[in-house]
Amino acid sequence: MIHKSHSKTDLIDIINYCGIPIVFNHSNNKKELHEKIMMVFKESSCVILEDNHFKLKTMVQLKQYLTKPNPKKQLTIKEKSGVMAIAKSIIYYAQNGFDLRMSPHYQDTQTILDDMLYIKGFGDIPSVRRACRLMSSDPKFSDQVFKPLISPQVMKTLADKLLVKKNRPMQYTFTRKHIVISFD
């Protein structure tokens, strides 16, 4: 059985990136995708998968991956809102010049360090990545490295966005020249 934490989008990504021989339509629901994947498992278990960012090589590894909870979906909604609140507090602290007197949430550096060490494990959340990036320039924590833990799926998405951004052609061109307008 495929664990219920894998969403329809996750299943589609797995089918596309691993090269699983399944024909699907985006109008298929999660249950239909689940059945199609289970049919592939029954038909062949020794198929070698394409190179993918999930680091899965065989159907057996894929089956083990799908039976376990989705590593991207570790937080409940309540936990995620708590992580977001901490990240926003740290961003506020960073935007006010790393001054503890300006921060309504922090009175000492140990609390900030504890919060950073807690939230850096949830690097799939954009606010956490931003907080880590901002805190890397805090002189009080120059000896600390706040590298967020990011799942392979999000890493692939970020790399794709960066590639598109680099390959985008110029949208605007400006020409400076002297123009004379006369009215009769």
Image: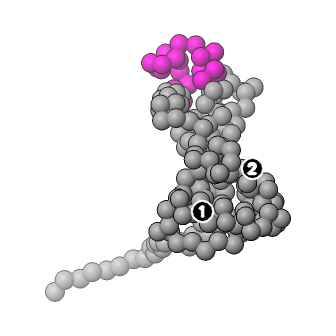
Amino acid type for the residue under numbered disc 2: Gln
Tell me what residue is drawn at x 73 percent, y 27 percent: 144
Name of the residue lying farthest toward the top: 107
Q: Looking at the picture, does residue 173 appear above or below residue 131?
A: below
Q: Amino acid at mark 1?
A: Glu
Q: Residue furthest bottom?
A: 184
Residue 165 in view (yes/no): no
Q: Which residue is mark 1?
A: 35
Q: Residues within 10 Å of mark 1 (few under 14, many from 20)?
A: few
Q: Secondary structure at mark 1?
A: helix
| Secondary element at tag 2 | helix
Q: Nearer the viewer, residue 145 or 24?
A: 24
Q: Residue 55, position in %: x, y? A: 78, 55
Q: How is the image coloured?
A: one colour
Residue segment shown in magenta: 93-115
- Residue at 49% of width from left, 62% of height from top? 29
- Name above or below for residue 45 compared with residue 77: below
Q: Residue at x 48, y 35 (%)?
A: 77
- Return the residue nearer the eye: 79 or 23: 23
Residue, far left: 184
Which residue has dot 2 on it? 64
* Placement of 75 over or under 32, stated as above or below: above
Please state if 79 lies on the left or on the right of 150 as rendered: left
Q: Is the C terminus in the top left, top right, bottom left or bottom right quadrant?
A: bottom left
- 13 part of magenta stretch: no
Based on the displayed image, in which of its 4 quarters is residue 122 positioned? top right
Task: Please identify the quarter of the rendering in which residue 73 is found.
Answer: top right
Residue 6 visible within the image: yes
Residue 104 belongs to magenta span: yes
Q: Residue 91: x, y in percent?
A: 52, 32
